[in-house]
Image: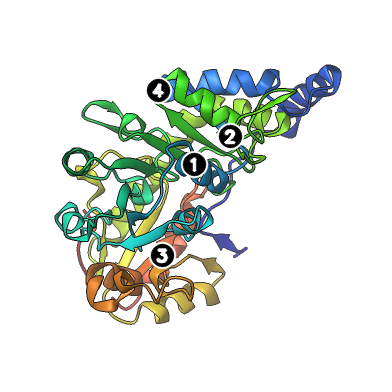
């Protein structure tokens, strides 16, 4: 069996990409908001059901810029159960992360724990739609409104996810996407900020281009966060096949749930209760998680323990009062139990069956 990794990008035939490259060469515009950049912004707004969207070179720079765009300072409440870029974006802006525990079902920030973490220095909440499962956006917004806080969603996993009111990305003051190669929709590397209005998008566009308004006017200490034409062109090509990719991911998710439903000491997320884009397939192993992880790896199945360790365990964060183990019992339990199994559109049924057989050999429970 060849190695099977937790994610693998869906690549269209190279011949389909060549006409885009030829047009870039003919236009002689490689960056700075070229034709494909503008086309992709418009196409993504239409597909995602949002009014304004600013493309970025990657999701991390987009997070950093989103915080700058809203002039966030002081303390920001966030989750320890995420990729490190979530908290790193705060440190890059001189902001103190305040970690709050997660809900055991959604794996997102627990709204019941947020208020107790608010101090006079708190200026914003940065929740994560973990694995693409929606946060409790109504509760979070109520808290933010009561305390006059901004809400920036790290929506790196949530491309195309909807809730009862439509697109999930329309909640909060800003939502930030990642288009990294491992994501459901990718541009090799890339990201975006979903903006509520044209004025906010204009400020964000200035910030991602060194603060330039025109060739002689700089209005902010911006950064170089622009997406290249090659990345934008690849995104346009990827967008053509996104619905097919999502349909395949849904079938893979269903096969995992059926194959693992009677495995003792393993549970899956109750995704049926939530909108999803099937970005990941996490399982939670109650005992001997690492033994199963090593068993899979020994058979060329390279799952990932997303998210282990917790962000709060890394040296730059573990000294914070909110990083104390006693403050984050649910997040710690999830981190100690999780394995994300291979999940991508081109995962073949025989490969998936092999993974399921490795897990079920010797062992029964609830993947509903």
Point out residue 215 in the picture as x, y percentages from the top left corner: 75, 23
Element carrying mark 1? helix
Question: From the viewer's perspective, is 156 left or right of 337?
Answer: right
Q: Earlier in the sequence, mark 4 or mark 1?
A: 4
Say which quadrant the N terminus sits in: bottom right
Q: Earlier in the sequence, mark 2 or mark 1?
A: 1
Rendered position, 241 above or below 347:
above
Q: Which mark is residue 68?
A: 1
Determine contact: label 3, label 4, CB under 8 Å: no
Q: Which mark is residue 50?
A: 4
**Tag 2 residue:** 207
Element carrying mark 3? loop
Please tell me how crowded label 3 is: few (under 14), some (14-19), or many (20+) other residues with Cα within 10 Å.
Answer: many
Determine contact: label 4, label 2, CB under 8 Å: no
Rendered position, 171 above or below 327:
above
When asked about the image quadrant of residue 233, the answer is top right
Please tell me how crowded label 4 is: few (under 14), some (14-19), or many (20+) other residues with Cα within 10 Å.
Answer: some
Q: Which mark is residue 307?
A: 3
When asked about the image quadrant of residue 251, the answer is top left
- Residue at the spot x=42%, y=67% of the render? 311
Q: CA distance from mark 1 to mark 3?
A: 26 Å
Q: Earlier in the sequence, mark 1 or mark 3?
A: 1
- Residue at the spot x=42%, y=63% of the render? 306
- Residue at the spot x=35%, y=70% of the render? 335
Residue 317 shows up from this direction: yes
Q: Earlier in the sequence, mark 4 or mark 2?
A: 4
Q: CA distance from mark 2 to mark 1?
A: 8 Å
Q: CA distance from mark 3 to mark 2?
A: 31 Å
Q: Earlier in the sequence, mark 3 or mark 2?
A: 2
Question: From the viewer's perspective, is 77 left or right of 30?
Answer: left
């Amino acid at each position: 069996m060849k190695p099977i990794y937790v994610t693998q990008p869906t690549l269209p035939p190279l011949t389909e990409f060549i006409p885009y490259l030829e047009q870039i060469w003919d236009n002689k515009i490689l960056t700075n908001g070229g034709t494909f950049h503008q086309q992709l912004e418009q196409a993504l707004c239409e597909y995602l059901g949002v009014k304004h969207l600013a493309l970025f070179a990657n999701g991390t720079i987009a997070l950093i810029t989103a915080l700058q765009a809203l002039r966030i300072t002081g303390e920001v409440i966030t989750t320890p159960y995420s990729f490190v870029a979530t908290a790193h974006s705060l440190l890059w802006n001189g902001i103190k992360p305040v970690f709050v525990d997660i809900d055991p079902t959604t794996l997102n920030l627990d709204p019941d724990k947020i208020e107790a973490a608010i101090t006079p220095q708190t200026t914003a909440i940065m929740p994560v739609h973990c694995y693409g499962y929606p946060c409790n956006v109504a509760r979070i917004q109520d808290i933010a409104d009561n305390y006059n806080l901004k809400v920036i969603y790290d929506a790196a996993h949530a491309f195309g996810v909807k809730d009862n009111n439509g697109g999930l990305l329309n909640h909060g003051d800003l939502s930030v996407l990642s288009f990294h190669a491992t994501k459901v929709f990718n541009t090799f590397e890339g990201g975006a900020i979903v903006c509520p209005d044209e004025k906010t998008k204009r400020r964000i566009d200035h910030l991602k281009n060194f603060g330039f308004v025109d060739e002689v006017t700089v209005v902010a200490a911006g950064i170089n966060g622009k997406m290249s034409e090659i990345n934008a062109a690849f995104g346009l090509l990827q967008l053509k096949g996104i619905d097919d990719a999502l349909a395949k991911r849904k079938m893979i998710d269903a096969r995992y749930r059926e194959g693992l439903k009677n495995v003792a000491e393993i549970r899956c997320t109750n995704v049926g209760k939530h909108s999803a884009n099937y970005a990941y397939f996490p399982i939670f192993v109650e005992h001997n998680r690492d033994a199963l992880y090593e068993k899979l790896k020994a058979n060329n199945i390279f799952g990932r323990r997303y998210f282990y360790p917790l962000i709060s365990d890394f040296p730059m964060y573990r000294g914070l009062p909110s990083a104390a183990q006693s403050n984050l019992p649910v997040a710690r339990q999830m981190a100690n139990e999780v394995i994300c199994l291979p999940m991508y559109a081109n995962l073949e049924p025989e490969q998936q069956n092999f993974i399921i057989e490795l897990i079920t050999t010797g062992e029964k429970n609830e993947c509903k």
